[in-house]
Amino acid sequence: MTQTVNKEEMIQEMMAKWPHVVRDITKMVEDLNIPDVTKWVEKMLHYNVPKGKKSRALAFINAYKLLMPNDKLTQDNINSAWIFAWCIEMMQISLLMFDDMMDRSLFRRGQLCWYRHNVLGLAAVKDCTFLLSATDYLIRKYFKEKEYYIDLLELFHNIIFHSAMGQSLDLLTTNFNNKLNLNTFTIDRYNSMAANKTAPITYILPINAALRLAGIKDQKIFSEVNPILLEMGLFFQVQDDYLACFGNSEICGKDNTDIQEGKCSWLIVVALQRATPEQRRILEECYGVSDPEKIKRVMQVFIDLDLPNVYSMYEKETYNLISAKIRQISCNILQSILQNSLDKTYGRIA
C-alpha cells in the first residue's frame, strides 16, 4: 500500500508558502496604487483563509506527490502545487463566506463569520468575489505556460459553477424564509444538491487537479474515479448534516442553523420518510422556524425516530459500498489515495 505524506509536515510546508501567496495578491493590488484597499485585502486574507482544516488542499497535495513521477517532483513543481493548494483554500472559504451570509450564521472556524466582523454585513460580498478573482490571478501567473493550463482553469471554473448550482438548489428548497413545502424535501432533490454543492469542491477538484498536474490524460482514469468521488461527496454532506445537529459545535467551529433556516438536510428527508402523521404535523409546524422551542420539538422528533442510530448504520454501509468500488479501480496508487481519503471521512467528528 502506498503511504501518504505526513500530515503535520504537509501543514507546516503549506503554511510556509502562505506569506508568498499573500504577497502575490497584495502586490497585484499595490500596483493599482490603492493602499487602503491593499491593507483591507491583507487583513481579510489573514482573517479568513489560513484557519481551516485544509483537508481539500492537503488531499490535492498528497495525491499530487503520489501520482507525480519522482524525477519530476522538482522544487519548482512542488512550489507551484502549493500555490494551487492555496487556490483551493481560497475558493473554499469564498463559498463558505457566501454560505454564511445566506444562512445568517454566527460563527465559522471558531470565530465570527466575516460578514459579522466589524458589522461588515452584505459588503462582505465584495470580499467573496475578490477571493475568486485572486485565485484566477494566481492560476494565470503560475500555470499559464503549462500544457495543462486550460484544463486546470476549466476544472476550477466548472467547480465554481456546480457549487453555485448546488447553493441555488439549497436556497430554493428553503423557499427564502416563506412557508416551506416539505413535499419537496425528497432524497432525489437532496442528492442533486449534494452532487453539485459538496462533491465537486471536496473530492472532485483535489483529485482531478492532482491528475492534471501529474500529466495524466487517460480519460479512462477520470471515468473510473469521478463517480466514486461523487459518492464520497454525498457521504460527506450527509455527515455534515448529521454533525450540524448532533455534533459538538465547539469542535466543528460553527453554529447550526439548518433547522431554523429550513434546510433540505439528510435528517429532515429521512425524518419525513419515517414520521408518523403526528410527527409529520410537528415537522410541518416547527421546521424552518427560528423559535427555540420549535427547534427543540424538531430535535425531539429526530431523537424519537432514532436518527442517530439510522445515521450510524448508513455510515457503515456506505463506507463498505464505496470501499468495494474503490477496489475495482485499475490504478493501485489511485486505489490507495481514494481509500485513504474515505478512511479520513469515515467516523469524522468535525
Image (cartoon, helix red, strand yellow):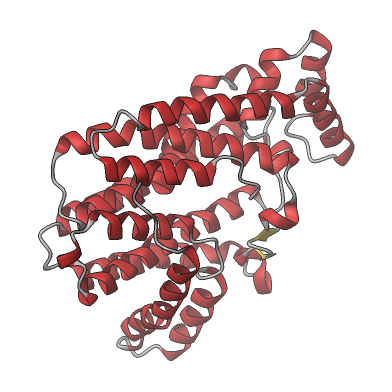
Residue 173 vs residue 178, the one in the foreground = 173
What residue is rendered at 49% in x and 27% in y?
320
Residue 110, percent from left and from top: 68, 64
Q: Is residue 133 above or below residue 169?
A: below
What residue is rendered at 30% in x and 28% in y?
328
Residue 226 vs residue 263, the one in the foreground = 226
How many discs mark residues in the rendered view?
0
The quadrant in which residue 71 appears is bottom left
Is residue 234 visible in the rendered structure shown here?
yes
Q: In this view, does 246 lie above or below 136?
A: above
The quadrant in which residue 306 appears is top right
Q: Is residue 283 above or below residue 24?
A: above
Residue 31 vs residue 139, the one in the foreground = 139
What residue is rendered at 86% in x and 35% in y?
296
Q: Is 39 left, or right, of 185 in this rendering?
A: left
Residue 208, percent from left and from top: 28, 47
What residue is rendered at 14% in x and 57% in y?
148
Is residue 181 visible in the rendered structure shown here?
no
Residue 161, percent from left and from top: 35, 45
Q: In this view, does 97 lie above or below 324?
A: below
